[in-house]
Image: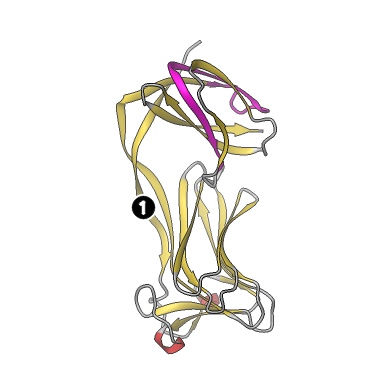
């Protein structure tokens, strides 16, 4: 059986795809006029000092106020390329200590990073769209008559900066896509096999493999794109995307 060469990525560089610290607008500016969607309540670029706070950077922040509604969403929709790894981050605070989120809606799923912080805290979500699609980046709070502040929203794409040719594993994963059972064959003795979802969460681990061939059962997992990380006993490692259908 022919084995495909799987190269090991040495390091990642981050390329900024989109960012906003709200200093490009004259305060106050309704964010619905500059490419954002606001669902319930109001969201404006405001002068931080005039609202009794200090911005993370610059002078302006986004003030998201629920008003008489029970929710406030501030959304940015961006088309992103499938198979690429992205990180969405934003600094948020809620003076009353109420729970609030940043969210990513991708592949029909909602990924969240939440907090109850009363001072600035950076939150981030790393994800990989399975196909090219519109991805919704969101900040969200669901308490009536309260405000949430947001600053330094950013979307970056992670790109490999180099490839270590000396650290390679000849690898075959079949079938791919699969209904759940994958057969893995490697040119080196594998120490471990790990499976991550597109949010970067570990969903399955096979430690102490100590073999060149292993069967991976993903039949109990949800359909979608996953990333295999395989480490050999000599320290070499590689990653490979697999699709569960």
Decide whether residue 4 is among the magenta residues: no
> Where residue 197 sits: x, y (%)?
56, 41
Name the foreground residue: 175 vs 90. Answer: 90
Name the foreground residue: 57 vs 53. Answer: 53
> Where residue 87 sits: x, y (%)?
46, 53
Question: According to the image, label 1 marks what residue?
Answer: 15
Residue drawn at (68%, 28%) of the image: 179
Magenta segment: 173-197
Against 213, residue 23 (above or below) is below
Against 140, residue 132 (above or below) is above
> Where residue 58 sits: x, y (%)?
34, 76
Q: Outermost residue toward the front?
A: 208
Name the foreground residue: 223 vs 194. Answer: 194
Name the foreground residue: 51 vs 94. Answer: 94
Q: Outermost residue toward the bottom?
A: 50
Would residue 82 appear left or right of 170 to someone viewing this image?
right
Q: Secondary structure at mark 1?
A: strand
Crowd around label 1: few <14 · some 14–19 · many ≥20 (10 Å): few
Quadrant (top left/top right/bottom left/bottom right) for the C terminus: top right
Q: How many numbered marks, from 0 up? A: 1
Residue drawn at (36%, 26%) of the image: 235
Would residue 154 appear left or right of 33 to someone viewing this image?
left
Against 210, residue 74 (above or below) is below
| Location of residue 19 (image quadrant) | bottom left
Query: Is most of the magenta stretch helix, strand or loop?
Result: strand
Residue drawn at (40%, 86%) of the image: 49
Decide whether residue 177 is among the magenta residues: yes
> Where residue 70 sits: x, y (%)?
69, 76
């Amino acid at each position: 059986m022919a084995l495909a060469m799987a190269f090991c990525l040495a390091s990642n560089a981050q390329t900024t795809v989109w960012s906003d610290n709200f200093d490009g607008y004259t305060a106050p500016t309704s964010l619905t006029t500059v490419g954002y969607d606001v669902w319930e309540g109001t969201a404006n670029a405001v002068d931080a000092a005039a609202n009794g706070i200090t911005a993370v950077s610059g002078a302006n922040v986004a003030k998201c106020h629920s008003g008489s509604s029970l929710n406030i969403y501030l959304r940015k929709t961006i088309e992103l390329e499938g198979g690429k790894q992205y990180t969405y981050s934003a600094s948020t605070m809620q003076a009353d200590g109420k729970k609030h989120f940043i969210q990513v809606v991708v592949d029909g799923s909602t990924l969240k990073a939440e907090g109850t912080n009363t001072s600035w805290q950076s939150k981030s979500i790393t994800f990989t769209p399975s196909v090219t699609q519109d991805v919704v980046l969101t900040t969200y709070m669901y308490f009536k008559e309260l405000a949430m502040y947001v600053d330094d929203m950013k979307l970056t794409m992670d790109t490999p900066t180099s490839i270590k040719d000396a650290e390679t594993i000849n690898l075959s994963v079949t079938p791919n896509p699969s209904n759940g059972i994958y057969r893995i064959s490697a040119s080196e003795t594998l120490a471990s096999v790990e499976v991550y979802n597109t949010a970067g969460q570990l969903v399955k681990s096979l430690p102490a493999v100590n073999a060149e061939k292993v069967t991976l059962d993903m039949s109990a997992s949800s359909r979608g794109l996953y990333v295999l990380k395989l480490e050999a006993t000599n320290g070499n490692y590689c990653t490979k995307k697999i699709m569960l259908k």
